[in-house]
Amino acid sequence: MRLGINGKCMSIPLRVLIVEDSPDDAELLLRELRHGGFDPSFQRVDTAEGMMSALEDQTWDIVITDYVMPHFNGMAALNLLQEKGLDLPCIIVSGKIGEDAAVEAMRGGAHDYFVKGQLARLIPAIKRELVEARIRQERKRDEEILRQQLAAMESSLDGMATINRSGEFIYLNHAHAEIHGYDTPEELIGKTWKGLYEEREVRRFENEILPILCLNGKWRGEATGKKRNGTPFPEEISLALIEGGGIAYIVRDISERKEAEEKLRYMSTHDALTGLYNRAYFDEELARLEKGRQFPISIVMSDVDGLKAVNDKMGHAHGDALLKQAAKALKEVFRAEDVVARIGGDEFAALLPSTDAAAVKEIINRLKKSLAHHNEASSASSAPPLSLSVGVAIAENGEKLIDTWRLADARMYLDKRSRTSRSTTKGPQAEPPRKTKP
C-alpha cells in the first residue's frame, strides 16, 4: 500500500501473468495479491502458445506459474522466459511440488516457490523480487550507457606521428602532442620517441615490440605512456613500417576506457546497494573453493532482522540505510581474504577459507561488538537498531560446500525463530558451529 495525494492508502499496480489451468486457483491468488496491497491487472494462460502471445502483447511485472498443468508446466514456462531473454521475476505456486522439483525449478530460473494454501510469504517475496528486478534493470541501463561511452571514445581523434630511422619525430598532429601533455607538436619535433616513456617501457619496446615490428611490418598493442609532467597513462598504439624507412605511429589515450572497463568488472561482481560481492560472484567462489585446498572452510549466513517492518513503517530509504549499515558491520569484522556477499534482499553470506571453529567464533564475537557499538552510537538518533540472525557451518575436508551453505542457512533461520525478542546491542546469538557431515 502507498499513500495518495489525499493521504488515503492506494493499492500498488501490478501487471501479473498467471500461468494456471484452474480459474478458481487463479482467483485465490488474485485475492491474496489484493489483500497484500496490490491492484493486479492480469491475464491467465495455461499453454505455451498462450504464454508466448501474452508476453508479446504486453509488458509484465511478474510471472506466477503453476508447476504441473495438463498442457503445460512450470519448467516449460521458465524455459520460455529464458528463450525470449526476459528478465522477469518468476514465482512458482503449486499444489504438487516436491523438494527435488523445487530445487530443479530454482536452478532453472525460478525466484521462489510456494505450495498452494501456504502463501504467507508470497507477498513479501513478490515485493522483494520486484525490488531486485528494478535493481537489475538499473544496472543494465548503466552498463548500456557505459558501453555507449566506450563506443564514443573509440571514435575519438587519435594521435598520429612519423618517426625517422633515428627514432626522432618528424611529424605529429595536435592530438598526439595533447595526449602526452604538450601544447603544440613543435615541442616534440626532432626529439626521440623515448622521451614519452619511462626507461622500463623503453626497454620493452626495444626488446619485445620493435623486433616484432621489424619481422611483421606492423604491431598493435598497449603500453604505458608518460605525460609531460611525468604522469603515467595507458595508451593503445599502432605501429607500421614506412616504405623507405621510418615508422608510422598512431596512439590513443585509453585511460577512460580502462576506467570504464574496471567499473564494468566491478559492477558484474558487486551488489549495487551495499558494495559487497553479489550472488553471482559468491557462487563462483563457492565452486572455486570447493576444488581447492583451503579447508576447513567456514560459511556464515546472516539476515537483517525486522527489515520489512522498517520498510513498512519508515520507508525503503531507511531500509536501504539499514542494509548498508549491516554490510559495513560485516566488512569491518571479516578478513580481506574472506568473501562477504549480499545474496538476497536481506541476506548476507561469507566464505571463510582456512577457518576453523575457534577462528569463526572469534569473528562472530567481533561482529557482536560491532553491532553493539553501532547501536550505542545511533541510540540517540531516529535510526532503527541493527540486529542480525546468524548461522554458521564448517566444511572440514572436502565436503560439498553447497551442503555446508544450506546448513548455515538452516541454522540462521533457527536462530531467527528461537528469539522472539532481542537486545539491539547484543548482536547475533549464533549457535556454536557444528561440523557438516561428509
Image: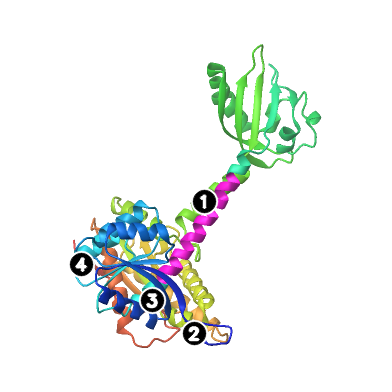
| Residue 140 tag number | none
Q: Secondary structure at mark 2?
A: helix
Camera-side mark, 2 or 1? 2
Residue at label 4?
99
Give how far apart the Cα atoms at labels 2 and 1 are: 35 Å
Residue at label 1?
264
Question: Quick check: marks 2 and 1 in contact, CB under 8 Å?
Answer: no
Amino acid found under the numbered disc labelled 4: Glu
Question: Quick check: marks 4 and 1 in contact, CB under 8 Å?
Answer: no
Question: Quick check: marks 3 and 4 in contact, CB under 8 Å?
Answer: no
Residue shown at 59% from the left, 24% from the top = 206
Question: Quick check: marks 3 and 1 in contact, CB under 8 Å?
Answer: no
Residue 346 figure quarter:
bottom left
Residue at label 2?
313
Who comes first in sequence, dot 2 or dot 1? 1
Q: Secondary structure at mark 4?
A: helix
Who comes first in sequence, dot 4 or dot 1? 4
Task: Tell me the quadrant of the picture where the C terminus can be found.
Answer: bottom left
Amino acid found under the numbered disc labelled 2: Lys
